[in-house]
Amino acid sequence: MNPEQRLPPTPEAWLPNEHSLYRPRHSRRQRTALTCALVFFLVPTLAFVFGVRATAFENRALRGFPSLSDGWNFFPDLSGWATDHLALRQAGVTAADGISTGVFGDPPGSNGSGSQSPGVAGLPQPAPVQPPIQYPIVIYGSDSWLYLGQDVGNKCNAVSDVSTVIAKINRLREAVLASGRQFELIVPPDKSTQDPEHLPPTFAGQQCFEARSAEFWNRVPAATGMIDLRAALTQSAVDVGHPIYDTYDTHWAYEGGVTMTYALADRLNPGITSTWVTKPRETQTWPADIVLLLNTTKYRTLRRYSLAPDGKSDRSQYVASDFRVPLRLKQPATAPATGVVSEPVGLIADSFTQFATPFLGAGFKDLTIVHPETMAQNTEQNATNLLVDRDVITVELAERNIAGGGSPLLQDSVIDAISKVLEQNPR
């Protein structure tokens, strides 16, 4: 048969059903896949049109839109920005985690892989020789106690060794001292350090976690002169009759903030707290954070306290702030000076200081507080605006953020920038 006389090719979908080459144009699987694809792409789009916006839910801020000046990094950064700002993303992550945990028995929050990767959001991490080991984001303890997996992950996947952490802290300390200012370091212990009795007998990363914790506490306090709160917190727990840390949260309560404030004030002015009077006040509800990682909501009941530096007038200031926008606490010029730290203090602090703010505002005449991540984003400008007029610079970093070397404040570029500004503006 001549080529011109041949029949045109017959599409597979047009062949008889019994033909060996028959393929339906739209099989059930194809239709199912098409439907899923439409749902996947259209539902977030429709949600966005009707006003649904992505919110931060992974203990970090959403990624900002990348700059064209970043060069080729613009394209991978754009992908991360688009993922963060996808409407209904949190619902999708929640559903995936529920299926992973309920159907396949994976640890909560692992989505089949073990956990979310620990570390400080938004910071470039050195490329490891081997990929970081994934640890569960929540550790289940006895008596319903929950521990944050980052206590383990940040130590076992440490960015630097303890000697390097000590060297960087001391480099910052020396720069502050050389500028004529006083430097203090406070490290609130992790819940797993202060109240380890509820930890399970065995857990992922236990060996490296315990080794790093022991080395940190054996070396860092003596090598850096930091304010070690562990003994004082133990005594505070005895005084109030309950643990300072909460069953479902990784932070201490207001009793921890009181303990921190007393310790800092006495370090700056020994004996100044002898006139201080602290009394219990009303209770306050506070959302617990660890259970949020399990897609559950529980509330803590926190006891508030008054603080009268002169023994008479309560000057506690309960101000809501996460210090991403710098906070200034300043007492009126007419306020009594008895028992009040008069030196202006600059405090670079994380979320533990939220529970100390009411008492810092009472016991310190002039205090500025800024989050380490904010300080790291535009260091020279922030140091100029927030540290130059301070006589004392204090750093508060949670144990898990400093023990593994992952705090943004320990970046060489950040230390260099702070050192430069303080050197140019001595006291």
Image (tube, rainbow, N blue to C red):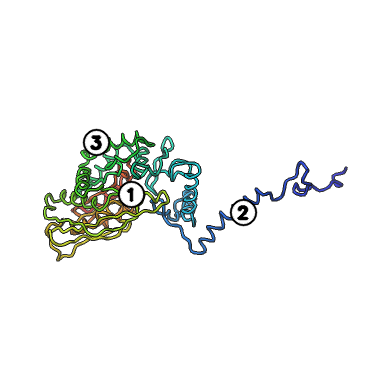
Judging from the image, what secondary structure is the residue with disc 2 in?
A: helix
Question: What percent of the width, then of the height, locates residue 143?
Answer: 33, 43
Task: Report crowding for label 1: few under 14, some 14 to 19, many 20 or more residues within 10 A (C-alpha).
Answer: many
Where the N terminus falls, by quadrant? top right
Q: Is residue 362 above or below residue 80?
A: below
Q: CA distance from mark 1 to mark 2?
A: 41 Å
Judging from the image, what secondary structure is the residue with disc 1 in?
A: loop
Q: Nearer the viewer, residue 181 or 301?
A: 301
Q: Closer to us: mark 2 or mark 3? A: 2
Which label sits on residue 218?
Answer: 3
Task: Report crowding for label 2: few under 14, some 14 to 19, many 20 or more residues within 10 A (C-alpha).
Answer: few
Question: What percent of the width, then of the height, locates residue 28?
Answer: 67, 49
Judging from the image, what secondary structure is the residue with disc 3 in?
A: helix
Q: Which residue is mark 2?
A: 35
Q: Nearer the viewer, residue 87 or 402?
A: 87
Q: Closer to us: mark 1 or mark 2? A: 1
Q: CA distance from mark 2 to mark 3?
A: 59 Å
Which label sits on residue 58?
Answer: none
User: Residue most toward the right?
Assistant: 1
Whether residue 423 appears in this view of the structure is: no
Q: Which amino acid is tagged 1?
A: Asp
Q: Is residue 266 above or below residue 49?
A: above
Question: What percent of the width, then of the height, locates residue 386?
Answer: 26, 56
Q: Tag 1 or tag 3, which sits nearer the N-term?
A: 3
User: Residue most toward the front?
Assistant: 143
Q: Which amino acid is tagged 2?
A: Thr
Which label sits on residue 249?
Answer: 1
Question: What percent of the width, then of the height, locates residue 356?
Answer: 24, 54
Quadrant location of residue 225? top left
At 37% from the left edge and 40% from the top edge, which residue is drawn? 153
Q: Closer to us: mark 3 or mark 1? A: 1
